[in-house]
Amino acid sequence: MARLSREDRHIALGRLQAGQSQSAIARHFHVSQSTISRLWVRFQATGSVADLPRAGRPRATTAAHDRFIRLRHLRNRFLSASSSVQALPGPHRLSDQTVRNRLHEAGLRARRPHRGAVLTRRHRQNRVQWGNQHLRWTVRNHWRHVWFSDESYFLLQRHDGRRRVYRRVNERYAPNCVDEAPVHGGGGVMVWGAINTAGRSTLVHVQGRITAQRYVEEILRPHALPLLADQDAIFQQDNARPHTARLTTQFLTDHHVQVLPWPSMSPDMNPIEHLWDELDRRVRRREEAPANHRDLLQALQEEWDTIPQQDIRHLIQSMPRRCRAVVAAQGSHTPY
């Protein structure tokens, strides 16, 4: 549980004296209600919000140390605890764990960071502009006509560091305890797909390097055009080079395909990205893991066909929320 700083204690005390409830104050500071209750009892008994004298080992850091550690890590969230130990001014004998404890008291804990695309100032401006232009779009009148498309690469074996092994001491290198990982995940397969509230495309296997010519002849002409026969249909694709090449643009124009303008570096705006994650999880949950690229492609195609259409519809229904989120974030990363 986070520990209130001296400044926060005075603020909490002022709110208590103003008549605000203990539960509301506890929610504001992200502490338990008993913490606020003890603070009030202590102030009534001693007239101070300072900690009472306690037995045991004295605190290793001063209030100035605590403030230095907290501000340093708030200014740069990727600093390590050991770097703060070395940067702490004055003589001291602090351990890395002491720094972590002070950060925990300030509500800061080490977490795996979200990995997002590199967004320049221009990217953010374009994302905000796109979000504002589509804020008034509704699922019923607009988004249900959009076919969202994308390519995705699936590895035969993926090692993300989350897998665990139960072993005894000194069994680290035992053959049955080693997670053997082939180079580059053993390779994988690339696929193309498109989704709409009313259906989905077939999952197309993309072999080798995709070019504008191959994109037109192997994907757009045989697979995308039949989906876009409706005059109200809108085609979405990202800004990959084969998608924006003159050959591709001319092909879509000649076939009177309405293309949805798309901001660069915006995978969080495309609901099909979530479908790729779901597809990957479904393949990983199969009792028999794919043994080769052919098995992997077959598993992907089978699982793609069995994903409920309601799940796809639910993803596309999130588009109004995505637009509001990117505008609220001023073009920065969103939780989607």
Image (cartoon, helix red, strand yellow):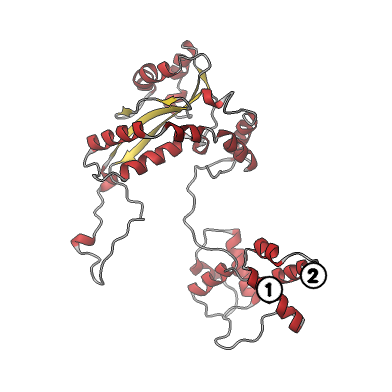
The quadrant in which residue 76 appears is bottom right
Q: Secondary structure at mark 2?
A: helix
The residue sitting at 49% across, 53% down in the picture is: 113
Badge 2: few (under 14), some or many (20 or more) residues near its Cα, within 10 Å? few
Front-lying residue, 163 or 212: 163
The answer to whether residue 49 of the structure is visible from this angle is no
Which quarter of the figure has residue 223? top left
Position of 73 relative to 207 (above/below): below
- Crowding at dot 1, Cα within 10 Å, few <14 / some 14-19 / many 20+, comes out as some
Give the residue at the far left of this rendering. Answer: 175
Query: In the picture provided, is 260 more to the left or to the right than 133?
Result: left
Residue bearing mark 2: 17
Q: Residue at x 35, y 37 (%)?
A: 153
* Image x and y of residue 51, in percent: 66, 81
Give the SS element for disc 1: helix
Question: How far across and down, in percent of the image, does residue 309 sit?
Answer: 43, 31
Q: Residue at x 77, y 81 (%)?
A: 47
Using the image, tell me which numbered label, if any, was put on residue 37: 1
The disc at residue 2 is: none
